[in-house]
Amino acid sequence: MNSLATSIVKTFLITTCGDSDISTSIIKENIDINMNSLKIERSITTSSLFDNVRIELSQYRSLEEDWDGYGGVKPSNKVIEEVDFFISKLEKLFIKAPDAMVSGAGDISLYWEIDNSYLELNFKEEGRYSYLIEDGKAILGKDDNLIFASLPQEIEDFIYKYLKQDINDSISKFNNLTIINTPNELETKSLIA
Amino acid sequence: MSYQEILALEQSKQSSYSPSVVDDEEFVGRALFTPNHIKDGKILPAAFEQIMSPNGMSVLRKGVNFDVSLAEIKKIMIAKQKTYERCVFAHVGSIRSIQCDDNRLICVIDTSRENIIGHADLISTRKVISCSLGKKSLNLYIRRAVARLFNKS
């Protein structure tokens, strides 16, 4: 995306402006700066959102037996570690961060609720998780998916449909570059949020 | 116990202390003693995991000696140094209507105790039915469906 956008802009400017070397270097610099800002902003934003679910997860380590008053057991350290690992996998997808919850049976879930759509990933036994998807009238679920395997297609579909929207917005805004060139002067504006 | 046998438990009193079977029009309440099951004012599905346990999940019948029953529960919990958060309610008929592939998933049974007359249990039929969902994802479905009802009320 970087090199393509740069190439397109450079080509346009070379054909429309006078001093190609100066104009293209200015534009490239702006594009590089803006792309880096977008990357940094995106990575910071994504990391800080996932920090909240990590903080919640870390609090589960200090739960004691009968923590809910109804005989609740604390999640095992191994399950907590595996959930943390899974969060790291999700983080790399640049998606909305999940919320977390813990049950009295010692299982931990990561979940997203977007309007009436719902995805829950539940971790109870080492090395595996089960999931539930509710999307309109469709109810899907599968037990015992391996933590280290690729995401099932149904989960990928849900992520693409509901959890990546804000990233697409950012890319869409970046793609809307407005270029204004006047004689002997070149100005580039980019609409990056 | 078979599916039909579990359903049949709702048709007769299950305790000598019970005043009556639990009617569809009643409301039952679940008392919460941990903030970990509440987020943004809503009760999380994980709060209802106990439905899947062999003895089911304890609730209190709102129309049967509720205040005294709740006070007794609180007394027990305070002795364990638990803090009462709140009590949430759901309509029994709606709970009984939760289904998967035309199978009822939850029964509401009166299990009165001598000192907690209004005691009842929600028990799941998941182990004795077949459903398109796996057993574990069915768990998740049940507790989310129940959470929605308790949050509605």
Image (cartoon, helix red, strand yellow):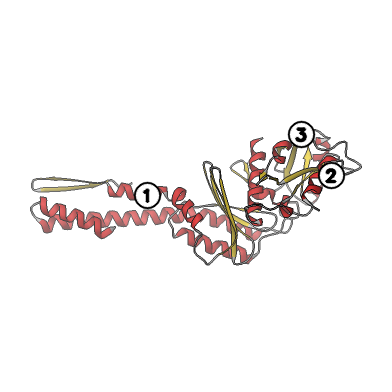
Q: x, y (%) of residue B94?
A: 69, 37
A103 and A63: which one is in front? A103
User: What residue is shown at x 54% (from left), y 57% (from top)?
Assistant: A54
Among the 4 quarters of the image, the one containing residue B109: top right
Categorize mark 2 by other alpha carbons within 10 Å: few (<14), some (14-19), many (20+). Answer: many
Q: Mark 1 belongs to which subunit?
A: A
User: What residue is shown at x 49% (from left), y 64% (from top)?
Assistant: A150
> What element does badge 1 sit on?
helix
* Amino acid type, label 2: Thr
Judge left or right: residue A22 versus residue A90.
left
> What element does badge 3 sit on?
loop
Categorize mark 1 by other alpha carbons within 10 Å: few (<14), some (14-19), many (20+). Answer: few
A178 and A163: which one is in front? A163
Q: x, y (%) of residue B41?
A: 61, 40
**Residue B35 visible, this angle:** no
Q: x, y (%) of residue A26?
A: 18, 55
User: What residue is shown at x 84% (from left), y 35% (from top)?
Assistant: B65
Q: Which mark is residue B26?
A: 3
> What element does badge 2 sit on?
loop
Q: Which mark is residue A168?
A: 1
* Amino acid type, label 1: Asn
Disc 2 to disc 3, how far (Cα)? 15 Å
Quadrant where the N terminus of chain A sits is bottom left
Mark 2 sits on what residue? B111
Disc 1 to disc 3, how far (Cα)? 48 Å
- Lower position in the chain sequence, tag 2 or tag 3: 3
Disc 2 to disc 1, how far (Cα)? 54 Å
Q: Are marks 1 and 3 in contact (CB under 8 Å)?
A: no
Among the 4 quarters of the image, the one containing residue A71: bottom right
Q: Mark 3 belongs to which subunit?
A: B
